[in-house]
Image: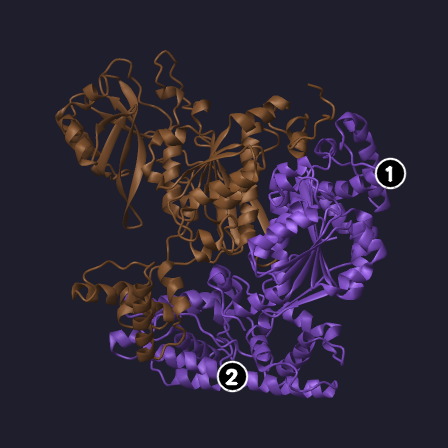
Amino acid sequence: MAEPKVKYDRQLRIWGEQGQAALEKSSICLLNCGPTGSETLKNLVLGGIGSITVVDGSKVEVGDLGNNFLVDESSVGQSKAKCVSSFLQELNDSVKAKFVEEYPEALIETNPSFFSQFTLVIATQLVESSMIKLDRICREANVILIFARSYGLTGFVRISLKEHTVIESKPEHFLDDLRLNNPWLELKSFADSIDLTVQDPVAHKHIPYVVILVKMADEWAKSHGGKLPSTREQKKEFKDLLKARMVSQDEDNYKEAIEASFKVFAPRGISLDLQRILNDSSSEVDSNSSDFWVLVAALKEFIANEGGGEAPLEGSIPDMTSSTEQYINLQNIYLAKAEADFLVMEQLVRSILKKIGRDSNSIPKATIRSFCKNARKLRVCRYRSIEDEFNSPNLPELQKYLTDEDSSIAVGIYILLRAVDRFAANYNSFPGQFDSATDEDIPRLKSAAISLLSDLGCNGTALAEDLINEMCRFGAAELHAVAALVGGIASQEVIKLITRQFVPMSGTYIFNGIDHKSQLLSL
Amino acid sequence: MAETAATQPSRSRDLDKLLLRPGNLVGPRFEPSAQLRDDVQNHARVLVVGAGGLGCELLKDLALSGFHNLDVIDMDRIEVTNLNRQFLFRVEDVGKPKAEVAAKRVMERISGVNIVPHFCRIEDKDIDFYNDFMIIALGLDSVEARSYINNVACSFLASVFFSPCHEIEYDSDDNPLEETIKPMVDGGTEGFKGHARVILPGVTPCFECTIWLFPPQVKFPLCTLAETPRTAAHCIEYAHLIKWNEVVHNFAHGGTAFDPDNPQHMKWVYDEAAKRAELFGIPGVTYSFTQGVVKNIIPAIASTNAIISAACTLETLKIATECSKTMSNYLTYNGSEGLHTKVAEFERDKDCLVCGPGVLIEVDTSVTLQKFMNLLEEHPKLQLTKASITHRGKNLYMQAPPVLEEMTRSNLSLPLFELMGKLSKDVIHVNGMTNKNNQKVSCLRKLRVTFKGVDGVTDMDTAGGA
């Protein structure tokens, strides 16, 4: 494997070598390289994506020079796809850049198998009907699809694939796995070996809070029938007991213990989110199951048996006031338990693989280890097909968005972006696309929007007149700043999808450049 | 000029729809016309502060949003680690000044755009330099730099109460004079997170009004570093902050200060940190991690910079043209767990030391400049030391350079009242050092000085007060 490139240092610190390797192995197809598509791809090329194929049938016009950085004077009259791909090639020579001078609509109609070769397709500026067709093709071929569109001061981004599973979701704020409310044998013994009433003041204030809380929780449980503090009064009492043990005001370890006492009160076991994943029908695995679900099946067994209701221990502990020795010892105890849990999980995974007829070594140790560490943070993202959403959106949600002041512009944009496509299908141009027609187009767009809302089951809902007028004003303009913003968002989602780290967005992101009250709609 | 579709294809084909057509959801003074588009193109000057991750994107976005007169200022040179996102730079450019290469590249690709680069620190420019611009767009990566520009922009703010023209009536509301409002658009990013905000001094909160948004940097307690290290970061900071200085005092390094950009210095810190880590049995010290801790490296990617810069550019366009509603007034973005954007409407701090009307100081006409400076030091809100004072552009006293100090030294013994042209009240600006989070930082403060017993000044009741 090639030596990590220094130039990627700032992003390696986010997604690591494995994430980078995933990017460098992937091949992306871009449909339409106006500014929206070009900006999306530029960000990915800078990040070191493996290969790109730019598909666009148009030639560069003078107007493109005013909104697209990836074309210049010398490219007027030439294939836009060719110019964009050669600029991108120059931007990062380790990316393999190709172009196809074809209209995406034509490829969708006549050559659907074209798309199967890609890891992911970025489809920009497509109209409703093309979106539906492409979506069917990509679902069939198991290719990740992401739509992005800029329209005047508005736009949207929408991911479409059946299922995306994430092990390394890396949430910013997540409770550490200290098991203060459910310590295992070795942790208990370690806590037992430490005397909280030690006379030496230095030693007293360097006992790590984990030990303090394990001991105090144990003491409490013994005098409360095995239960931990649950009512408000009990929790306060518990904290007061901690305070009472402080011999001076500068005992940071006790202050940390008091602050962390909520970890003792937290319920044992696994979260509802994780429970939902375990209960998913995909956890009943067979030979077609993905590695993720095999691991989930093993996790399910672990939790039901050796885990005693808990997932494998994550294994790391946060920094805390402590003597170095005690901290290191504590750290080792957590690491040892995490390792022991991992070994059990490994066996479970191997036996499940055997049971479903797969090679028992086909899931690497490193993957199982990572799965164990991240077991409490797993995410499963599923996306409705475009056709389903467009034909039968979640009606209660839609009605809620339409009536809620905060989301009414965003949902108005969502409806109007579809209405303009219907308009275009009828009149062969977008409303306001040409200066002369703007006034007639407003009532036409309005009736297209009303009929769409009616089709969707929202009779009688009115969209703000001002918004309808604005959409006509925009005249399907592709403004660079909007394209760059929408493209930025789309490129970020692509990175999350390909690296399989962090959590991709759900639903449709509606960009509202009018007052920036953008919104995610789950329809 | 015909208003229907021109026979000549226009570069601004898309932008024209926004600027030439009337709209409903627009600013109150929107005047759609070719004139508007041309004015933006020919007369609007925008300054981009920073030519890094945000700056490169800002220059491109602004140039392609109709702004053809841009300046860019950045004191740094291009490094290899910039190349994953600062798309105007190539490997061959490493070592060259960012501002110059960025300006050149954008001008090469977008004809008609003129970008003047400034390869220097923001402090090196006269305050008047900043006043030449219609809008200032910030693509900075430090709190201090933002604070500085914020101070400068807010110093232009004048109110009717203290206007240079004495015929204007006293306005007890102390509203800012509109033509002195210097709009700023400020963006910041870190990994998958970012913010974009609009600052209209005197109207929306300035950077100082919301300084509490930026929590102080985490510093490890000295005793942890020295006696009870537990993590790799503790070992690294011990080597960086403690061991280096011990060794410096023993002249092993010839008494040199630690330079994070010197690979030999960094290697030394890494080796010492690794030794300490091994001694204490602490895992995790790697060269990369050492760099991260010592340089406080912030992870950065192209996409977040693209998003935030684009948002800033849109707002810049709206401020310049009123072609749509403006963001009010602080957008936060987080793309790590799903996608979260939110616009919050923060409010000004009426008593803000920077964008407020200025701390009111009442003195006798006999007070000398030196005495006045002593008062500033003792003033509970200001605590200003090493003050340099200007009044309407005139230097009353300058701490530096030595030539100016010598020239203005004699003013110290003169009455402030005389130095200020015997005005009963007026605004002065003071540059100096003050305390923030137990650190001495430089600052620029606006003060309203009123002299006791001079006619015209009977009522000290103004908005806020000292």
Query: Residue A247 appears in which quarter of the rendering?
Result: bottom left
Front in this rendered view, residue B127 or A59? A59
Query: Badge 2 is on which residue?
Result: A339
Q: Is residue B130 above or below residue B140?
A: above
* Residue found at x 56% / y 70%: A18
Chain in brown on the image: B
Pointers 2 and 1 within a single chain: yes
Q: Where is residue A45 in the image (x, y as percent from the top left)?
A: 59, 56
Chain A drawn in what color? Answer: purple
- Say which quadrant the N terminus of chain A sits in: bottom right
Chain hosting mark 1: A
Q: Is residue A158 above or below residue B408?
A: below
C-alpha distance separating marks 2 and 1: 64 Å
Q: Do the residues labelled 2 and 1 touch (CB within 8 Å)?
A: no
Q: Position of residue A323 (x, y in %)?
A: 32, 76
Query: Badge 1 is on which residue?
Result: A426
Query: Residue A501 appears in which quarter of the rendering?
Result: bottom right
